């Protein structure tokens, strides 16, 4: 199990591979973000996007899936997240793109009120297959502390 | 059509009604956030959540749906979003909850580089049916400026 004490400021990780399909982009957008430029190439052609692109929230969801798969692989003692800061959607994500994640730990803090947990602060960057950053955020994760032996 | 010039700092809006179902919570979590505490009451009982709760990203997606429905109703000249700041998940969202949104415009800025657009900065708070805030964020929206007459 990977506990708070096992996270080091400055350490980096690279993981994930998510193939973005047109079917999934349309399904997510029709449920949660039915703005015309996420649902129709004609409407998208009149905007900055040019053609159908994924909802920014869909990019977040696909990123979360890559994070969770990595948390499982690492056997991290994760306890969820209180939130995040500075989320930026930098470039459109299009059907046919393949996404991946780079993460850097920028802070590790024991909780002041709860002795059995703490938080890690992570700079996440999501790249497409052209190695262009499409999204960045500073995410906060709650992690269990190592139990006393 | 509602253009940048029609947005006023300090104005508030209250909108949306989203009924959170167990089926949808499980469907979203199994695709995008398959952490055990989002998929099983037994696993959730061992955590702060107590029972199955929605992925925080699902709460974002449901909130986006309420925002988009409101954008359409207002006929806002929206052009998408570059991102958001200070997203916080304050309380779990459970199946059976009903969500709604309160929004306050805290800044309106014409773009310095693009004369036909600008941005609105909005403080969003999502409440459950007990009027408890479950999520807050500062969102940024791009909006078209009113064309010269």
Image (spheres, coloured by chain):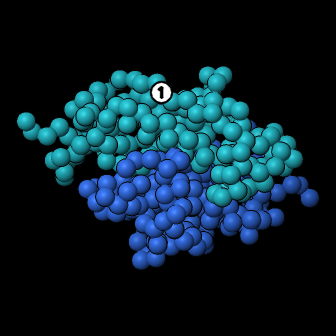
Chain colours: A cyan, B blue
Residue B52 falls in which quadrant of the image?
Answer: bottom left
Residue at (60%, 71%) from the top-left corner? B16
Q: How far from the left and from the top, in percent, is residue B46? A: 26, 56
Local packing at callout 1 (Cα closer than 10 Å; few below 14, some 14-19, many 20+) is some
User: For this rendering, which residue is in front, B96 or A102?
Assistant: B96
Which residue occupies the extreme right position in the image?
Answer: B149
Task: From the viewer's perspective, tell me whether residue B135 is left or right of residue B8.
Answer: left
Residue at (82%, 57%) from the top-left corner? B146
Task: From the viewer's perspective, tell me whether residue B127 is left or right of residue B2.
Answer: left
Q: How far from the left and from the top, in percent, is residue A109? A: 25, 39
Q: How many marks?
A: 1
Provide the chain ID for the residue under circle 1.
A
Q: How far from the left and from the top, in percent, is residue A115? A: 16, 47
Task: From the viewer's perspective, tell me whether residue B94 is left or right of residue B67.
Answer: left
The answer to whether residue A128 is seen in the rendering is yes
Which residue occupies the extreme left position in the image?
Answer: A149
Instruction: Tell me the SS state at disc 1.
Output: strand
Residue at (42%, 66%) from the top-left corner? B94
User: For this rendering, which residue is in front, B117 or B103?
Assistant: B103
Residue on which the image places disc 1:
A15
The answer to whether residue A119 is seen in the rendering is no
Image quadrant occupied by the N terminus of chain B: bottom right
Q: How far from the left and from the top, in percent, is residue A69? A: 44, 36
Q: Vertical placement of B69 versus A74: above or below?
A: below
Image quadrant occupied by the C terminus of chain B: bottom right
Residue at (78%, 54%) from the top-left corner? A36
């Amino acid at each position: 199990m990977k506990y708070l004490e096992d996270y080091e400021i400055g350490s980096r990780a690279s993981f994930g591979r998510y193939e973005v399909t047109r079917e999934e982009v349309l399904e997510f957008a029709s449920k949660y973000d039915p703005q015309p430029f996420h649902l129709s190439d004609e409407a998208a052609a009149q905007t900055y996007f040019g053609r159908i692109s994924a909802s920014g929230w869909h990019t977040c969801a696909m990123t979360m899936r890559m994070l969770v798969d990595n948390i499982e692989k690492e056997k991290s003692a994760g306890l969820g997240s209180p939130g995040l800061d500075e989320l930026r959607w930098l470039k459109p994500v299009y059907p046919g793109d393949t996404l991946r994640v780079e993460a850097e730990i920028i802070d590790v803090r024991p909780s002041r009120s709860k002795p059995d947990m703490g938080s890690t602060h992570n700079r996440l960057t999501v790249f497409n297959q052209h190695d262009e950053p499409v999204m960045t955020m500073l995410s906060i994760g709650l992690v269990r502390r190592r139990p006393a032996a």
